[in-house]
Amino acid sequence: MTADINDDIAQRADRLYAARSALAEAKRPARRFGVAEIVQFLSDPSRSLTPEEQRALFSDPRLRADYRRLKTQATTFELPALAAASSGAVNSRRFEGGSVSIHPSRVPGQIYVIVRFTPPADTPRMMLLESATGELLKRALPTADQQGEVMMVLNERSEADAGFLRLLVDPTSTGTFVL
């Protein structure tokens, strides 16, 4: 009888070892992009979306609807696309609640972006830009001065600054200011 028990224990140990080995070798599933990540993206100025996350967001209609709903809840002002007659880059844009103006600096490659909020109220923490093709770029906003003005100095040689500026001057892109 003890031989049967020992054989049974040995077989169970072999199956357990095989199962644990298979689990150790199996890849962990890729982290799924969902509502929690959207909330984090909209609330954390330093959180950006990877290209894979952007693809997931724009390819899943339910996730896209959740994104739009959450973005609307977090938005203070909308920066609309400009009229269809607009062509080429723009250097100023208006939105309900303020304006954005873009000025070259005397320093080569440096651009000033000035956002004016009227009347001075709770200044948004972030500006989120979206291209007509679905590209999303976000920028934390500096604290506004007493007149409700925010100034950003962008460097055209910086990939992040150049991308943000490209969407900002594109008349077909839209934007939101997030608290």
Image (cartoon, rainbow, N blue to C red):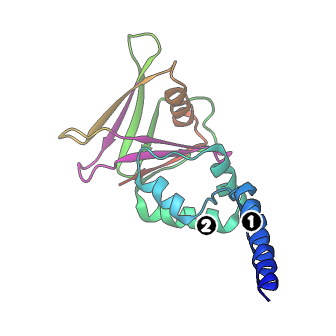
Q: Which residue is mark 2?
A: 65
The image shows residue 163, relative to residue 9, as above or below, that is above
Q: How far across and down, in percent of the image, does residue 18 sit?
A: 78, 65
Please provide the residue range marked out in magenta.
112-141
- Assign the C terminus to one quadrant of the image: bottom left
Give the number of the disc on residue 110.
Answer: none
Q: Badge 1: how crowded within 10 Å, few (<14), some, or many (20+)? A: few
Whether residue 134 sits left or right of residue 41 in the image: it is right
The quadrant the N terminus occupies is bottom right
Q: Amino acid at mark 1?
A: Tyr
From the viewer's perspective, is 152 left or right of 71? left
Q: Are marks 2 and 1 in contact (CB under 8 Å)?
A: no
| 117 vs 178, nearest the viewer | 178
Query: Which residue occupies 77% across, 76% down?
Result: 12
Amino acid beneath label 2 = Ala
Which type of secondary structure does the marked residue at label 2 adopt? helix
Q: In this figure, which residue is indicated by the disc labeled 1? A: 17
Mark 1 residue element: helix
Instruction: Compare residues 95 and 145 and report the one nearer the observer.
Output: 145
User: Residue 138, position in %: x, y?
Assistant: 48, 43
- Residue drawn 63% across and 65% down? 63
* Relative to 149, residue 64 above or below: below
Q: Is residue 118 magenta?
A: yes
Give the x, y percent position of residue 165: 51, 30
Q: What percent of the width, then of the height, locates residue 8?
A: 79, 81
Q: Give the mark nearest the N terminus, 2 or 1.
A: 1
